Amino acid sequence: MSGTSLDGLDIALCHIQGSGVDTKLNILHFETLPYEEQFRTYIRKIFAKTAINQQDLCGINPYVAITHSNLVNQALAKWGVNPLDVDLIASHGQTVYHAPQILTKDYNLPNSTLQIGDGDHIAVHTKIITLSDFRQKHIAAGGEGAPLAAYGDFLLFTDMNETRILLNIGGISNFTFLPNQNSALQGFATDLGPGNTMMNQYMFEHFDLEMDVNAEKALSGKINDRLLFHLLQEDFLDLAFPKTTGPELFNLSYLQKKLEEANVDKLSHEDIMATLNMFSAKAIVQGIRKVTAGLENIAVYVSGGGIHNPLLMQNISAELPDVKVASIDEIEMNPDAKEACLFALLANEAVAGNPDHVSGLKDSPAVCMGKVSFPY
């Protein structure tokens, strides 16, 4: 799994038994192998940009696949695992553009998304059958291509008594709503708004750093209430669920627009980071409040890179004083490995031929996702 933070490739070696509601998943090994700066430079040339050099896109597609293949081979060698003993690779690829109609406003063109890192290259370079490009089937069947976590979350984490919010904070924040098994409500997944993306973009632009490690910059700043108010004035945040978004909307241009609307000046970089941190927290909590109003016995379990931002977690918890907020490791899932594991599960469902495993979810197309690439 490779997300928008571009910190590295999340590689999980999973042992999966059964399929559908009988699925059992165990993580045998997990590691995030960091990307070299050259990789990040190439991706930034084409990531979330409306106009790019097509020659760059053409070449970076196999470059991503070969890079991912090398990292997979490196991880397997480190773990002492023979590639011949691995049945499948589930490769998400690298998202470079996400264009649902609600963002593009061009209703003559269908929902679309683009992940690069060609599956054939991965299969050939690892000698392992590879499933890739999962999101296209979701769109073809009427979805927006995201979030896909609902499929795995429904199978692995639905509880008899507890209503669960499976919150993932990556570049974009999203959650899966899982009502308890005694409820008549249906589960679903949706994007919420920015997670780490605007903070990471700002850190790279002004500090030449990939992220605000331990929220050091944000903690030394002060929230500007006027800027925060204007950041929260965004139509996307008020759209009905489910919905998807990306850095195509929540980016530094969005921030600049809101700075101008707020008519604030002399804000330090640290003040802006503190405000962006609270903006992400408020957008997340606003979404959670919409689905939990009137419900009891609710728990929010958090995964993704945002869990390592102590101020973001503190802000979310403070905004949800009546709701349990905890790491997803409390229900026996590594918070950093979760997304990689869920794509392994999607691959397992595809080869098992289970298109109808999400009958308990709302607005989730019942399809088998992933395209198969053979190594020979």
Image (cartoon, rainbow, N blue to C red):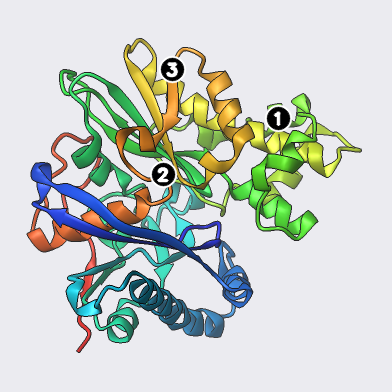
On the picture, is 136 further left or further right than 234? left
Label 3, secondary structure: give it. loop
Furthest residue in direction right, as rendered:
266
Q: Residue 330 occupies which quadrant of the picture?
A: top left
Residues packed near mark 2 inside 10 Å, few (<14), some (14 to 19) or many (20 plus): many
Question: Mark number for residue 58?
Answer: none
Q: Is residue 22 above or below residue 122?
A: above
Question: x, y percentage for residue 23?
Answer: 13, 47
* For the residues bearing labels 3 and 2, Cβ distance under 8 angstroms: no
Label 1, secondary structure: give it. helix
Q: CA distance from mark 3 to mark 2?
A: 19 Å
Question: x, y percentage for residue 253?
Answer: 70, 51
Q: For mark 1, what is the residue?
A: 228
What residue type is disc 3 on? Val
Q: For mark 2, what is the residue?
A: 335
Name the residue at 25% across, 83% down: 127
What residue type is disc 1 on? Leu
Depth check, front residue: 134 or 318: 318
- Counting the numbered discs, the total is 3
Pointer 3 or 1: first along the chain? 1
Q: Nearer the viewer, mark 3 or mark 1?
A: 3
Q: Quadrant of the N terminus?
A: bottom left
Label 2, secondary structure: give it. loop
Name the residue at 46% across, 32% down: 239
Q: CA distance from mark 3 to mark 1?
A: 23 Å
User: From this viewpoint, is residue 185 visible?
Assistant: yes
Q: For mark 3, what is the residue?
A: 323
Name the residue at 24% across, 35% down: 157
Pointer 2 or 1: first along the chain? 1
Furthest residue in direction bottom, as rendered:
376
What residue type is disc 2 on? Pro
